[in-house]
Image (cartoon, rainbow, N blue to C red):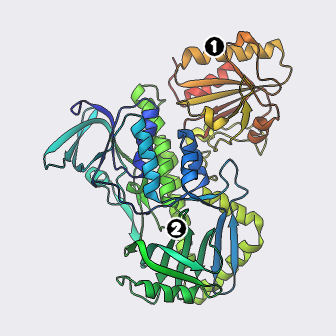
Amino acid sequence: MKDELVDVLVVGAGPVGLVLASELVRHGVSVRVIEKVAERPRVSKGLTIHSRSLETFDLMGLADRLVEAGFRSRGLNLSSDTGSHAFVSMGDLPGRFPYILILPQWRTEEIVEGHLAGQGVAVERQRELLELRPRSGQVDAVVELPDGDREAIRARWVVGCDGAHSAVRKGSGIEFAGQPYPWAAQVMDIQLDTDEPIDVLENYTTKRGFVMFMPFADGTHRVITMDHAQHDAHVPTVAENQALIDTVVSAKRIQLVGDPVWSSHLGVLQHRQATTYRKGRVLLAGDAAHINFPTGGQGMNAGINDSVNLAWKLALTLRGQASAGLLDSYEEERHPVAKAVGKLTHRMSKLYTVRHPLGLLVRKRFLKVVGHKRSLQQKMAMGLSGHAVSYDETARGRTLSNGALGAKAVQAGAPAPEVHLLAPDGAPVRLYELLREPFFHLFLLVPPGASETALASVQKVLTEVRTRHPGVVTPHVVFTDVAEGPADLGEPALADPTGEFASRYGASAPAAILVRPDGFVGAHLSGLDAGAIDTALAAWVVTR
């Protein structure tokens, strides 16, 4: 019923709000989603989905559908008028998705909203948030309905995923600190005629301006132009954009064909971040919490991963099973990530727009170094893709760090690497497929020829987890030699016959690896000590 108290009201049905709602439902939370616009605009605002975000979608079971609908770019080219050139390949990224997926935002939203509908939640459109009224244990959100009437939606929590001009953020009085850029840009989706196909993201920059090309699966291209010879308020014509392209991209022929399918003039580019992501029972995610220079799709990807980080923490909080301060760790983990993204895109904006002779020299040398140093290319790829994001320097990350592990071992707070295992029936199964079961997963790595004592330790851990964390922690026994462990364990065992799990995680069996609901490592413990495992779990969940 509409007047019932809902667990979470999600304001905004863009990618961030839809992912948040879907993840909340997956974790057993009741949700309503409201959106101001009557129907989804078929425009491709955000269109790059990076590798780590695709792993996030893999947790939801949506990655393959998105990949099938999009264009896989193997990397990006960076070129300047000085002749300097660098190619940043995504081919060496870890996991299943060593590329940048280019997919119009409306299509991403369509796929995620369809998934959400399958979970039993429909987006309520033409609902505009007017006011937030905090009360004890809940928030009343006053919403204007399509017929002009008003409804007070009662929710235990409200999350603003309503973009840069967020009504939730404004209604909560949260400051959006930052400043505008002194530049404007033109964005268009249009057909191209070229001598050579454009099959990667291509960036060209000169003293005159900046041009970027991104290919779509349907043959059209996203083109972004920035002409330093024009003032910010001027909206360039197709002919003027063609003249800029001819000047900036002098090494090859790229011809705009016909009128744009869609275009937008970005007259006020900004970089801003909310000073806090939470005020009482109101939280922010995505562009409502942070915006940056629109390059490389960093903003949308950061927002999607905000949602996945927040969803399970809200779910545990609502269940009364969150450890002390768990919900506050959302801001502790995600605020620094958005700040780092802002710094990265700000530096990229300087790279693209520099006009001073000294700056031009720095850009030339930078591109020359990147073009010749593979290690730097790989570092850039890890950063752009999101694989470099880690929460190891947070309070929990430091507390759960295992000093006994080797230098290359995966520690608490790091992204969980994908591994390929065998189910008890011999069928292949991936770790990220297993993680689709809600909440935490505990992997107990058992060495070959394990002794009776070792198996007794496994049994003790399994008994403790089943008793103290039912429905919150799913245990898995992983043998490195066989797919079927002793029957008295009461748990079907997985097999890691190639040792991939131990290799990817830098683990030495016996070991216990806890994976969080968002695909990050919660703890990496040496041995199979039930007490140590229970202590690690207590950092995340309330034990019985």
Q: Is residue 405 above or below residue 126?
A: above
Q: Residue at x 28, y 36 (%)?
A: 155
- The residue that mark 1 highlights is 463
Instruction: Work out whether residue 210 or residue 352 is closer to the camera in this orientation and state it.
Output: 210
Q: What amino acid does circle 2 point to?
A: Thr
Q: What amino acid does circle 1 point to?
A: Thr
Q: Residue at x 47, y 52 (%)?
A: 108
- Using the rendered image of the protein, determine whether residue 394 is visible from the camera's viewpoint: no
Question: Taking 287 as reference, is 435 left or right?
Answer: right
Q: Nearer the viewer, mark 2 or mark 1?
A: 2
Q: Quadrant of the N terminus?
A: top left
Q: Position of residue 127 (x, y in %)?
A: 24, 48
Quarter-of-image position of residue 235: bottom left
Q: Is residue 20 above or below residue 463?
A: below
Q: Is residue 88 above or below residue 491?
A: below
Q: Position of residue 215 (x, y in %)?
A: 56, 68
Q: Residue at x 43, y 29 (%)?
A: 28
Question: Taking 104 as reference, is 481 left or right?
Answer: right
The answer for how far apart the CA atoms under marks 2 and 1 are is 50 Å
